[in-house]
Image (spheres, coloured by chain):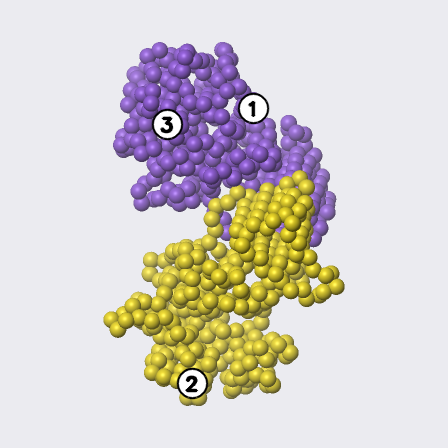
Amino acid sequence: MNTECVAMLLAGGQGSRLGSLTFNNAKPAVLFGGKYRIIDFPLSNCMNSDIDVVGVLTQYRPYILNNYIGDGSAWALDQVQGGVHILPPYMGQKGGRWYSGTADAIYQNLDFIDRFDPEYVLILSGDHIYKMDYSKMLAFHKKKEADLTIAVMDVPWEDAHRFGIVNTDEEHCIKEFQEKPEHPKSNKASMGIYIFTWKELKKALLDDAGNRESEHDFGHNVIPMLHESGKRIYAYPYSGYWRDVGTVQSYYDANMDLLDTDCDFDLSDRNFRVFSNNTSRHPQFIGPQAKISNSLICDGCIIFGKVENSILSHDVVIHKKTSLKNVIVHTGAIIEDGAILENCIVGARARIKGDARYVTDPADTTPEIHVINN
Amino acid sequence: MKNAVGLILNVDGEDDSLKDFLQHRSLSTLPFGGRYRLIDFTLSNMVNSGLSHIGVIGSHKYSSLVDHLGTGKEWSLSRKTQDLSILSGSNNYHIGRLIKVNLRNLQNNRGFLDATGAEHILIATPNLVTTFDFKNAYDIHLKNDSDITLIFKKDDPLYHLKDNDLYLEFTKNRVSGLHYKREHTTGHFFTEMFFVKKSILEELLDLSERTGDWDLMDMIKYNIDTLRVFGAQHTGYIKRVNCLENYMKTSMDLLEYEIMQELFLGKNSIHTKIKDNHPTLYDDPAQVSNSIVGSGCIIDGTINHSIIFRDTQMNVGSHIQNSIIMQRCEIGRNVNLNYVVMDKDTKISDHTTLVGKPHAPIVLKKGTVI
């Protein structure tokens, strides 16, 4: 088998900063924008980039994720050769162990990549919301004859200290890395998307695995090592919508971006669709007294109350005399008669009693987001 | 229901009032309820009752049926075990009157009957809107060692009945007479769903070959004394879509929460072909009440007492009420619609007003641009 580019999607992280949203669920399988799960974005990007071999590395709470990915047909990744492969840690002749870092997870699956004998390997992570045509980045990588290409985007200068920052020359060749720098020299932030030339990656992973001091992390160990040894590392400039949804606040904000008409992230764009694994549900039932404005609502919802500036996943029931404002509700939650919710995230299958009051001061422009689970 | 197979066959014909919808599709794939096709109800009821082999006889307009059913995956029917068979098309001859169950259709598909090892066949029409568990009826069928078990409803539940609709007459618990509406009515109405023993069906098929009488219901009617025919009662909601007025009324029934609950929120769901749509976006000026809305819509206008299918776009200042808007329609600004049924892919430009009547809604054919 020969495949030009294999994608490896790192989906094993716990996502502890998402609090109770990831108690029973891996971060890439957390719901987003109503019907989607975070992993839909990189998988749909692969589909839209003609990348048809994807290895998904799972580790933490994988059940929902595995079940959701299924045979990959939702993203047209159900090919006879290739397609999507779920890669959990496994036992070998010398025993087995967990993935101990991003680079280690790929290292443990060298055999998998070798089966496809690719020229290039694309490394993705399962916690970003964006649309990107990786084939353009691959073309850039080939044109630059790079060993490694890192996707970067301009972030506001005041936020640059929260990112891995790269400094490049005019040819986009990376000259310096700064990890979360106090005094950033540029505002080009790494998006955690890498294309490696496979033979270089393989060599680097074998070296890294032999290094007892290494934490086996791409950002901290492997990439600095390649940089020091003088490999050709380029920055692929990306402009467009991209969000890291690693914290409750950033997750909430990115969801709410979908309701902002000025935001250029469009899920209804037919030219670059985001696919998801759908199941059959009845259409939305909107009751006689319901009031809905500026909201995204999924199939299976039943609404008798007032819903404003909110996102409802599948099978949510909103009873009478309720009011929801700036709220994200996950699958199957029930909001009982009289509940008033503002600025909350309601977890899957939660039941909110009628006397619930989560109301914030209108003067507070950055109210804390409550995550309600039960 | 290991020993039974399902057979879906239109026993209602296609009424002229629906002809605008049925140019490119059969009655079985008429869009219904925001995301379904009519056949989804009968097919899901069969699957949910435990039938694992189902044959579907379509009309000559096959493509929408084949496109909709695909491999049957969405109804948990697998291609590998040949759970779903799409059979040879139906011939409904109008010679004086419409034959309900035309045995020629079964004769053409004798191979399906021969191949099944099951001893009982459940035949049902694809234009019923109901959720029904066939298990009880099947138990009655087996317990009475019945040749034929007709599923009936008390009183007249199905809106307009036609002259060739059938009523059951009982003597004790056995069906002792079958009457066409034009002859005689009773309180027990045939729902066009029934179990028949395969051996009996084969006998009747052989008989019809010799006599040239192709009407199964006629043959049952005239041989009612020699056949063991029993009835099984349907007690829930059931409506039959066989004309435009029934289509409107049955669609609007869904806006009553109790009916919606019975049809969609019970333990068994109605399955349909899955589409990959974004969630529906209700923009700031949207005002929607008492309606059913599919996914993938973008709504900026006012909607009341209507059914909106998937992927519809509706612009600012527009007002829809008492209407059915099928998939992928586009509605411009300041459009007013009342009692309108828009078939798929229809576009309405700005400042258009269309007002139909409850019994005679305005119908816009598929792909119309106004």
Closer to the observer: label 1 or label 2? 2
**Letter of the chain shown yellow in the rendering:** A
Q: Chain of mark 2?
A: A
Q: Dot 1 lies on which element?
A: loop
Q: Chain of mark 1?
A: B
Q: Dot 2 lies on which element?
A: helix
Tag 3 and tag 2, C-beta contact below 8 Å: no
Q: CA distance from mark 1 to mark 2?
A: 78 Å
Closer to the observer: label 3 or label 2? 3
Residue depicted at x 41% and y 88%: A229
Residue depicted at x 51% and y 87%: A175
- Sequence-first tag of 1 and 3: 3
Within the image, what quadrant is residue A231 found in? bottom left
Within the image, what quadrant is residue B117 found in? top left
Residue depicted at x 70% and y 34%: B355
Look at the image and tell me whether residue A145 can be seen.
Answer: no
Q: Amino acid at mark 1?
A: Tyr
Q: Which labelled disc corresponds to residue B159?
A: 1
Residue occupied by mark 2:
A225
| In front of the other: A337 or A274 | A337
> How far across and down, in percent of the image, does residue A200 sit?
37, 80
Q: Amino acid at mark 2?
A: Met
Q: Please check whether the numbered discs 1 and 3 fall on a single chain.
A: yes
> How far across and down, in percent of the image, does residue B78 sit?
35, 44
Q: Which labelled disc corresponds to residue B138?
A: 3
Look at the image and tell me whether residue B169 can be seen.
Answer: yes
Q: Colour of chain B?
A: purple
